[in-house]
Image (tube, rainbow, N blue to C red):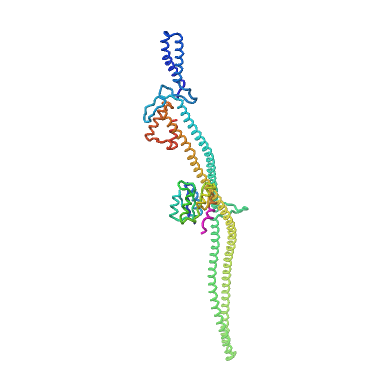
């Protein structure tokens, strides 16, 4: 069971991701923006972070960069889940330190497969 | 707006006044001047009238511009105080103001064209979004309907396991439901238990018969002891008779009779004992026969019960195996339906995401296009209002009056800045003013 943080300004999208991941037995914490996410990330340790890109305030890419500055999240897998699919945006995400890029709408099975790949075996 | 016909009527009156004013000196001097001077003065008067008329008369109106209805003489430029709520004087339009008005109209046209293009683009995108939203809603509805159907099938399959209305393959008796199956096993168990109880009862009967046999055997033992004692007595009697016969000879016949009587008595006793032993043996044989018969009957019943139980249990086992296979098939079906339900739920998740993305796109379109168009119109409104406030002669009196009233209301804080207010507020002001 992994402890997973999901960040999206859309409540519907958060619920969909939460439903998919919770059904697989993982523990999920939700955040509506980057500030809430950083606050949660500093209060507890997450095994995986899934974030939207386009959000009010700091974007998901900026959030990834901020998380990578934290010692606990230097090697934590961080996935970006967004409707954006332009290569330059992906490059920005990769440069910020994101582990993966998933384009919305996501397929629940595909998302769980990605989780299995990026989560530590234990 | 202004009326060229009315303006033309006012010009004739002015021309008539000017003509009278110029021609009056000529009329006064025509009697005293030479004829050539009168003619020259008349020509000059006419020329003066023409010049005056050119100076007084308005320029030809632009095709789309109308001039104010009442156009008395007013200054071309009016310093308009927005705090003054008294209606301004009526205006006339100069050529320069017409150019400014045309520029404003052109700005309005450009703003309207841009807004129209944006709204058309928004309309196309909204149509596309609506199609996607409709498709997503239909997919979600279909998924829910499918889930409901499959859940119903699962319930039916589960309930079928508890009912015995499923006919057996190839006809014949129907497969037992789980409760019926349990009842059948219980019935067979009761049957076997009953047979075992019968067998136990038969064993108890046999035990009683063995007690009787034991009693008979004790009697026979006593009778055999009696026979042994009798044989000893006969042997002793024979020995005594031999001794007496050798001592006394054959002279005393009474003694011989006495011996013979005692032997006869002993013989009768032995005969009686033999008969009783035979009766005892007969009783034992009869009891043993009954015992064996009861035992045989009991064992037969138990054997029959066991055979029947074996047959029934075998049938139940066959039924159980078939039932197990049926349960396996049903559970496989339920599992398959569960997998389909999972896929349908995944489709619903994707559909919900489409709905969410659609909502975000609609919000994006609203911000980019509609607010852009609103801001463009609001800008044109602001520029027009600025021009009108600085050039009140551009507009009819009633429009200027409404503008002043609007400005006064704005000063009271009702709608301070249309460009900064919401789209609806700006639009309402635009609609109200223009």
Quarter of the picture holding the N terminus of chain B: top left
Residue B11 figure quarter = top left
Question: Taken as a whole, is the magenta stretch helix, strand or loop?
Answer: helix
Is B127 part of what is drawn in magenta? no
Q: Is residue B414 above or below residue B2?
A: below
Tell me if B236 is positioned left or right of B429 in this view. right
Q: Where is residue B146 in the image (x, y as percent from the top left)?
A: 55, 47
Quarter of the picture holding the C terminus of chain B: top left
Is A120 part of what is drawn in magenta? yes
Q: Position of residue B340 (x, y in %)?
A: 56, 50
Q: Can residue B155 be seen in this view?
A: no
Q: In this view, does B271 lie above or below B4?
A: below
Q: How many labels does the image show?
A: 0
- Region in magenta: A112-122
Residue lying farthest to the bottom in this orientation: B247
Q: Position of residue B75 (x, y in %)?
A: 40, 24
Q: Is residue B214 above or below residue B146?
A: below
Residue B135 figure quarter = top right
Residue B381 vs residue A103, the one in the foreground? B381
Residue A94 vs residue B288, the one in the foreground? A94
Residue B413 vs residue B330, the one in the foreground? B413
* Residue visible at 48% across and 36% down in the picture: B373
Q: Is residue A24 visible?
A: yes
């Amino acid at each position: 069971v992994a402890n997973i943080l999901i960040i999206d300004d859309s409540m519907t999208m958060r619920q969909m991701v939460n439903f998919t991941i919770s059904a697989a037995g993982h523990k999920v914490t939700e955040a509506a923006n980057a500030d809430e996410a950083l606050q949660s990330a500093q209060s507890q340790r997450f095994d995986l972070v899934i974030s939207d890109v386009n959000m009010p305030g700091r974007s998901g890419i900026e959030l990834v960069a901020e998380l990578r500055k934290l010692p606990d999240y230097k090697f934590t897998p961080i996935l970006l889940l967004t409707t954006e699919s332009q290569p330059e945006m992906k490059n920005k995400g990769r440069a910020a330190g994101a582990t993966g890029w998933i384009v919305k709408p996501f397929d629940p099975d595909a998302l769980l497969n990605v989780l299995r790949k990026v989560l530590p075996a234990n | 707006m202004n009326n060229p016909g009315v303006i033309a009527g006012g010009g004739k009156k002015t021309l008539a006044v000017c003509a009278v004013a110029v021609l009056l000196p000529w009329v006064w001097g025509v009697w005293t001047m030479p004829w050539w001077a009168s003619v020259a003065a008349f020509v000059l008067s006419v020329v003066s009238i023409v010049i005056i008329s050119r100076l007084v008369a308005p320029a030809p109106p632009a095709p789309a511009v109308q001039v104010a209805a009442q156009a008395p003489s007013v200054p071309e430029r009016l310093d308009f105080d927005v705090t003054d709520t008294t209606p301004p004087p009526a205006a006339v339009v100069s050529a320069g103001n017409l150019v400014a008005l045309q520029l404003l109209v052109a700005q309005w046209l450009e703003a309207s064209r841009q807004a129209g293009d944006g709204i058309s683009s928004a309309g196309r995108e909204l149509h596309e979004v609506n199609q996607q939203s409709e498709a997503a809603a239909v997919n979600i509805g279909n998924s829910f309907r499918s889930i409901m159907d499959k859940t119903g099938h699962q319930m039916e399959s589960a309930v079928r396991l508890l009912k015995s209305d499923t006919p057996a393959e190839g006809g014949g008796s129907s497969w037992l439901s789980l409760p019926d199956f349990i009842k059948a096993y219980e019935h067979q168990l009761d049957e076997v238990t009953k047979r075992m109880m019968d067998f136990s009862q038969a064993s108890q009967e046999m035990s009683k018969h063995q007690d009787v046999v034991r009693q008979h055997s004790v009697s026979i033992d006593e009778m055999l002891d009696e026979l042994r004692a009798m044989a000893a007595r006969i042997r002793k009697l024979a020995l005594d008779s031999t001794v007496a016969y050798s001592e006394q000879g054959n002279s005393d016949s009474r003694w011989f009779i006495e011996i013979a009587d005692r032997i006869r008595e002993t013989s009768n006793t032995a005969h009686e004992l033999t008969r009783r032993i035979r009766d005892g043996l007969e009783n034992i044989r009869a009891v043993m026969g009954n015992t064996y018969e009861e035992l045989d009957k009991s064992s037969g019943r138990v054997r029959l019960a066991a055979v029947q139980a074996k047959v029934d249990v075998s049938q139940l086992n066959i039924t159980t195996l078939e039932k197990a296979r049926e349960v396996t098939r049903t559970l496989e079906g339920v599992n398959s339906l569960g997998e389909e339900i999972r896929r349908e739920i995944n489709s619903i998740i994707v559909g919900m995401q489409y709905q969410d993305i659609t909502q975000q796109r609609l919000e994006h379109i609203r911000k980019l296009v509609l607010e852009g168009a609103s801001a463009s119109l609001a800008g044109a409104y602001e520029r027009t209002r600025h021009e009108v406030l600085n050039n009140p002669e551009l507009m009819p009196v009633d429009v200027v009056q409404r503008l002043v009233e609007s400005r006064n209301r704005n000063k009271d804080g009702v709608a301070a800045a249309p460009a900064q207010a919401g789209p609806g507020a700006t639009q309402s002001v635009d609609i109200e003013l223009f």
